[in-house]
Amino acid sequence: MPEQSMHADRSASEEFGPEASSGRVDDYLAAQNEPTAQDAEAKAYLLSLEKRIREEVAHMRAEGKYPPSLARRVRTYYRTLLPDGAASGQRDFDAIFNTVDRIAYMDIDVPTASAKPGVAFAKRALRTLMAWYLNYLAQQFNNFATNLVHLLGITDARIGAIEARMDTSAFRATELLDTTASVRVQAETSAKVAEILSEVRGRILVAECTDGALLERLVEGGLNAYGVESRPGLLQTAESRGLELREAGTLEHLASVAAGSLSALVLSGLVDRESAATRVAALAHARRVLEAGAPLVLACASPQAFDEPANRVEADLSPGRPYAAQTWEFLLGRLGFDSVTIESFKAGHYLVVCGNARRTPELGALADNKVVLQALEPPKERRR
Amino acid sequence: MTGRRGSPTEVAILLPSFAPFDAIGTHVVELRSALLEAGIDARIYADEIKPGLEGEAIPSRKLMKGRRRDGRFILYQLSTNSNLYHHLLQRHEPLLVQYHNITPRAQVMGFDAGMATAVAWGRRQLEDLRIRTRLALAVSHYNADELAAAEYESVVVAPPLIRPLHTPAASRDYAAAEHRLLYVGRLAPNKAHEDLIAALAVYNETFAPRATLTLVGSTTVAAYGEYLRSLAQELGVSNAVTFASGVSQDDLARLYAESHLFVSASRHEGFGFPLIEAMRSGLPVVAHASSAIPETAGKAALLTPSSEPETLATAWRMILAGTDAREALVDEGHKRAADFDLGRSKLANLQALANLVPIEGVVAAPLYYRREATAAPGSNS
């Protein structure tokens, strides 16, 4: 299962290979140099190595040997120590912009010094003779460069304004909370979730996994489960339980998981407080990453639970509100899940359990949601 | 040694910079020797000749200012941009290009804009030289694909000539209190030293015994060197990382002999000759499967699908702690290194050249690519 890359910001630079050759060259090479048995053997060998290493990394993670805090530390220094201009952040943009601003000027005052006798004189004469011509060229270039730099500056300011607005809307106030309703929902429903998933033999993801209590219960039951959590405090608690963890947001992690690679998925937190678009996108990803027929479990708080004093701060800070069970039933049906069952618990908590039916979803009103459509599309084959 | 006089055929081996112990420097010296042994008058011409090598090469201006000589072929070693390019376009002798690859601009852009411009110019020269080039030699199929993509007329593959080091008897104790990792390659961003340093930090936090990492290579991008040192410092492995430049051939041989594992995270290699040197020394190799590395390493290296720290650390551990896997890798390494035996490689280069240069008794190697003739506009064909 491909994990989210530490070098995500480098993804473009990872793809350097031969310059894209023309289709004609590709066809010729394919015809003239047909893969030999040796080529096939080498390819199989590479694939077997890749599988062995991935399995070993997964095994190490499952044993808690590569804790997220270590990865976070390495990743932080990777980025913060890079010289300005080497990455793609605002500081890098500013550094390169300043350089461009400084050098976007053609100097016609050509150096004429020379150690050889007479050469300096000849150079000066040439410079004088060509000054009218060079000046004409330089004026055109410098006018163009000045306007181009100005245009870049305006573009930066306008993009900056959009980013500032996006940053404001993307700010997750709930990240400030030490605990959320999902911690309590998981504690309340963990026995039932463990019972529902007890027969699952493949990979299980719990996202968000909060303090790891539910995840620990699944692992103690002999299940192959790992968790995703983005809040450092909760992650640290989960890490202390020796669990296999990833530090990431739920949607961000789901986007990096290979299609059909999970045998069960437990979603919580996001299902209570995110916007409708985010929740639907998460369900669409769940359709893609789950095996056919695999169970999806939503561990939810009810709208009434969010009105309880313990959850009031979270309720106020959240972009969305919990759904009634019927709403989930409606959405899951539209997105192609089946066998939806609902079980209620005290304190207004409930579980929604369904299967990934793999039938064509009736997208209907969701059809204009690009995130959903992209998540449901089969991955495209990359051209050689 | 300046060549065999009186031969009707001469190969002028031309390169921008001729340096001692440099991969291309070594290659051209051995290639000249192979041509001389085959009865061809061969000489090395260079734009820049490093001190100590004055007797080995002739300044390129003597070739460029001289008259055309019948029977002379120019074999240009292309690995960077050079002003020689302008002269080459004006020469009338049949031109051959031997391509060692040029780092793509985007891989160095963030650290050194000047170098990025230079390599971009080099790639442009690669494209333009095809007009004059009759035969292009590539040191790997990876490079041959780039030549074919640039629409060179005829492309043939021949390996680089890698001279054996005088490696002392290896004394590797894998039960030692510390494992020594080695990487050889100049300090340039495309070599991804930072991935090795990050993986070392993860390795030393996770496994015992701890490891040290020796990075052999000159600093070509100063900002990158500073970044690597800061990274090692902040990740708490500065005492475990050694930067070594200007290493003599004897010292390099000793490092190969004394290390426990050769590691590479490089993102771009046209061939990767240190991998072969490591294999010759019986050193197991773990490398990121990028660019030409899978082709060069064959089955003789543990190739990793990514260069993320956990992946590299895990792969290192698999070899350092797994006796069977390690021994199998070392055995395969000796076999793979034999594929690049100097004698065999010299013959392969002569066979490749024989597609254009008449070399008595040498059968031309099959071409990897030949551009199809394009019908002239308005013709009936």
Image: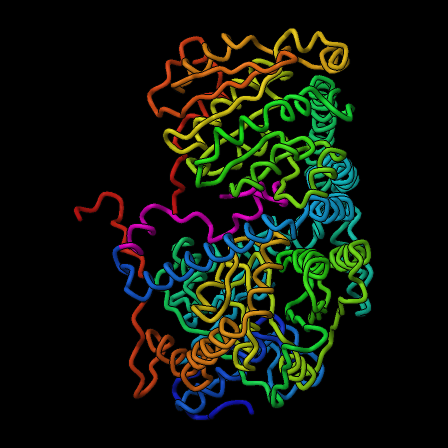
Q: Is residue B325 visible?
A: yes
B68 with respect to B244 (left or right): left
Residue appearing at x 50%, y 71% in the figure: B325
Between B43 and B138, the residue placed more toward the observer is B138
Total number of numbered discs in the rendering: 0
Residue appearing at x 32%, y 87% in the figure: B360
In the figure, B259 relative to A337: above or below?
Answer: below
Residue appearing at x 28%, y 64% in the figure: A37
Residue appearing at x 71%, y 7% in the figure: A307
The picture quadrant where one finds residue B154 is bottom left
A281 in the magenta segment: no
In the figure, A157 relative to B286: above or below?
Answer: above
The stretch of residues the image draws in magenta is A1-30
The picture quadrant where one finds residue B134 is bottom left
Where is residue A103? Give x, y as percent. Answer: 76, 42
Where is residue B170? Give x, y as percent. Answer: 61, 86
Where is residue B309? Give x, y as percent. Answer: 64, 54
Between B224 and B299, the residue placed more toward the observer is B299
- Tell me the quadrant of the picture where the N terminus of chain B can be found: bottom right
